[in-house]
Amino acid sequence: MRKVFWEGTHRVRCPHETWDLVSPRLSDYGITRVADVTGLDRIGLPVFMVVRPLSKSLTVAQGKGVTEAAAKVSGVMESIEFWHAESACPEPVHSGVAATDLRSPYLLEGLPQYPGSLLTSSMPLHWVEAQGMLSGAPVLVPRRCVELNDLADGSWCPPGLYPSSNGLAGGNCRAEAAVHALYELLERDSVARRHLDSARSPGIDAGTVPDPCCAELIRRIRANDVWLEIEHVANRWGVPCFAAHLWSDDLPVVCSGSGAHLDPAVALSRALSEAAQTRLTVITGTRDDVDEVVYATGRRRFAAPPKTSARVSWSTATAPFTTAFDDIDRELEWLCGLVRDETGGEPALVDLSTAADFSVVKVLAEGLAFSLDIPFYPEEAAS
């Protein structure tokens, strides 16, 4: 299927069309409020907040984009994705069975786990059926990696697999959802490995970015006296990945965002808009998962933002990246092959969709690094 929308992201349907499609169904997913919170911050990059009071995980989702329509759809789709992971996860095809008994092709050790995990291949788990994204063959994956449910049920289990929204994505079609899920997996792997390696990625000279969409985002940030640093996150995938960090004297905590995409401008656009979204996450104070230390640190006033790293021009940083697709199915096939070639195993997809005209999927791939998102860096801001 060919892409038709190219502003800050690639989609097979324009944001206005997607909004017209999903907005009549918001109550079906427990969404009670869609709020434009852009004006609460000085930057003015579009951010929307979406509230789902009866959520089993995150009550508030947030969406960002280069336009109001894109940001609104982004937030609504994130909330819908979480609803599907909570309420549309397939029932187990095997319950209380160890991986050794199923001869699963997946190494449990290669999936995200809690620190101090006691998981072994002999531990009984519930399994759901996924599909190999290249072979199409059925493959069993732990249900714990697909379902999101933070409600306490009074039971106890040893620390093991870590359930998260990493690789959970929605789209106008299944291929689009799967592509965005894979990009998220690659982005998180790249950022996590950067932190593990303790290596400082080279900075990008923001003034050399030629893409009109990104240039406008940068202009808005700088015009409102917000310090900006852009990192080029080198990674094993050879895919453009960037992190953006924002700081201002009225919110003296470094707020960050990241993005990965074969189109470097899309990767940067995601990083910039996510960093602005992170600021509004702090400002609105409505997210369930923001640690109180962020607000404790925010009461302190810092004289200057963090030190910047050496910078290179946009053309220098992006010169190696030449792969591009205007067809979403071909892009998906290429990304799946990339993951297989790097990890030795094909990614697997669980289709959570409940509607015929848009899709929600969960994609799993073993051997990818993952760390809890840490969008705030108060220690750096204090240096």
Image: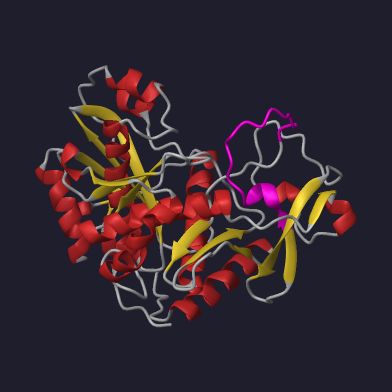
Residue 357 image position (x, y, % from top left) = 44, 73
76 within the magenta span = no
> Which residue is pictured at 33% across the width and 22% down the height?
295
The quarter of the image holding the N terminus is bottom left
Look at 86% across and 59% down and name the residue there.
103
The residue lying at 62 percent from left, 31 percent from top is: 152
For the point 41% across and 68% down, the residue is 262
Left or right of 343? Residue 269 is left
Whether residue 325 appears in this view of the structure is yes
Is the residue 289 above or below the residue 16 in the image? Answer: above
For the C terminus, give its image quadrant.
top left
Q: Is residue 330 above or below residue 246?
A: below
Q: Is residue 150 magenta?
A: yes
Q: Position of residue 115 (x, y in %)?
A: 65, 33
Secondary structure mainly formed by the magenta segment = loop
In the image, 226 versus 99, the foreground residue is 99
Q: Quadrant of residue 291?
A: top left
- Determine the image quadrant of residue 59: top left
Numbered range of the magenta stretch: 141-159
281 to 232, vertically: above or below:
above
Q: Is residue 335 left or right of residue 40?
A: right
Q: Position of residue 98 (x, y in %)?
A: 85, 49
